[in-house]
């Protein structure tokens, strides 16, 4: 097997300040598909002029994480695919190690790097694959032959819980999920979006975290069970809205208002409609 057996899929949103480091860490023999959710056509031109192994697709709308990755995966022709976040950096031989593991353990469905910063991984002495229930979504290696229906992420999620849901679906179908200590990928968490949008990003994250949390539990249990699970978060949001209102902390109050709105919208059965403001 070679790098030609892997296609890397990256979903981006206002990621121009961080994605260059990620792309430079990828072997040029490996095809990359980028799904750009924020309409940055200048980034498309910049990337395609610099890298001849990249297909750059500018979506007509903000598709969200799962739907953008599904679009990228639908265009993959290779045996394996690697979902990456734009705020990642592949250590040397990461792709070779993925391929070596795939050759030795062809029964896997999903494979991820050991979590943590570089030193956490380098200091790990255990080299065996680790059976896990879930993988963090920043880097997931797909054995596409295990997905007969080519159905990957649930597109009802716009942000958050997509990776947990994917792993649960794989487990329900008796698929095998592993962590690999030999694969080293550095992840700068929550750095994939332009930092100038920090407050808008926080509102967006809080809204969708709460929406997705209720949707996930309702999907795999029922409405009442999901409501019971999220009720502490509901009460916490209400309490903190009042608290931050009383101490005149407007930003914190707004954040918890968005948490509450996301949860209420999910409880009412509304779609995950909220989108980050770029004004």
Image: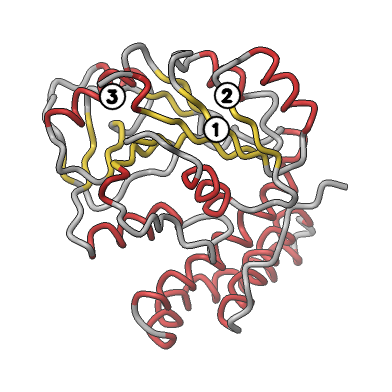
- Which residue lies under the disc numbered 1? 33
Task: Pinpoint residue 99: horizontal percent, then vertical percent.
Answer: 25, 25
Badge 1: few (under 14), some or many (20 or more) residues near its Cα, within 10 Å? many
Whether tag 2 and tag 1 are in contact, CB under 8 A, the answer is yes
State the image quarter where residue 226 is shown: bottom left
Label 2 CA crowd tier, 10 Å (few <14, some 14–19, many 20+)? many
- Among numbered discs 2 and 1, the one appearing first in the sequence: 1
Q: How is the image coloured?
A: secondary structure
User: Where in the figure is residue 82, as x and y percent of width and height?
Assistant: 40, 34
Q: Is residue 201 left or right of residue 130?
A: right
Name the residue at 35% across, 59% down: 149
For marks 3 and 1, the one nearer the N-term is 1
Q: CA distance from mark 3 to mark 1?
A: 21 Å
Q: Nearer the viewer, mark 3 or mark 2?
A: 2
Q: Helix or strand or loop: what does disc 3 sit on?
A: loop
Residue 54's disc number: 2
Residue 124 location (% of width, % of height): 20, 22
Residue 183, label in figure: 3
Tell me the quadrant of the picture where the N terminus can be found: top left
Q: Are marks 3 and 2 in contact (CB under 8 Å)?
A: no
How far across and how far down the image is residue 20, in percent?
61, 18
Residues at circles 3 and 1 in contact by the CB criterion of under 8 Å: no
Q: Secondary structure at mark 1?
A: strand
| Residue at 28% across, 18% down | 96
Identify the residue at horizontal 69%, vertical 58% (top origin). 255
């Amino acid at each position: 097997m070679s790098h030609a057996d892997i296609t890397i899929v990256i979903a981006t949103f206002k990621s121009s300040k961080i994605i260059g480091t990620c792309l430079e860490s990828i072997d040029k023999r490996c095809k990359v598909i980028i799904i750009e959710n924020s309409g940055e056509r200048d980034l498309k031109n910049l990337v395609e002029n610099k890298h001849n192994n990249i297909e750059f697709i500018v979506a007509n709308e903000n598709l969200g994480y799962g739907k953008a990755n599904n679009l990228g995966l639908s265009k993959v022709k290779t045996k394996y695919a690697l979902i990456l976040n734009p705020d990642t950096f592949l250590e040397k031989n990461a792709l070779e190690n993925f391929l070596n593991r795939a050759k030795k353990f062809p029964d896997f469905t999903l494979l991820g790097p050991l979590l943590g910063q570089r030193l956490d991984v380098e200091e790990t002495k255990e080299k065996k694959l680790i059976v896990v229930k879930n993988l963090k979504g920043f880097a997931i290696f797909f054995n596409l032959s295990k997905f007969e229906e080519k159905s990957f992420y649930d597109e009802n999620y716009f942000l958050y819980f997509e990776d947990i849901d994917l792993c649960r679906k794989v487990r329900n179908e008796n698929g095998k999920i592993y962590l690999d200590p030999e694969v080293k990928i550095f992840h700068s968490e929550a750095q994939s979006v332009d930092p100038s949008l920090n407050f808008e990003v926080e509102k967006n994250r809080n809204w969708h975290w709460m929406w997705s949390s209720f949707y996930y539990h309702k999907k795999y249990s029922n409405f009442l069970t999901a409501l019971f699970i999220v009720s502490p978060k509901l009460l916490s949001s209400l309490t903190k809205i009042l608290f931050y209102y009383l101490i005149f902390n407007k930003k914190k109050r707004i954040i918890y208002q968005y948490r509450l709105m996301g949860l209420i919208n999910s409880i009412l059965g509304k779609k995950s409609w909220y989108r980050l403001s770029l004004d």
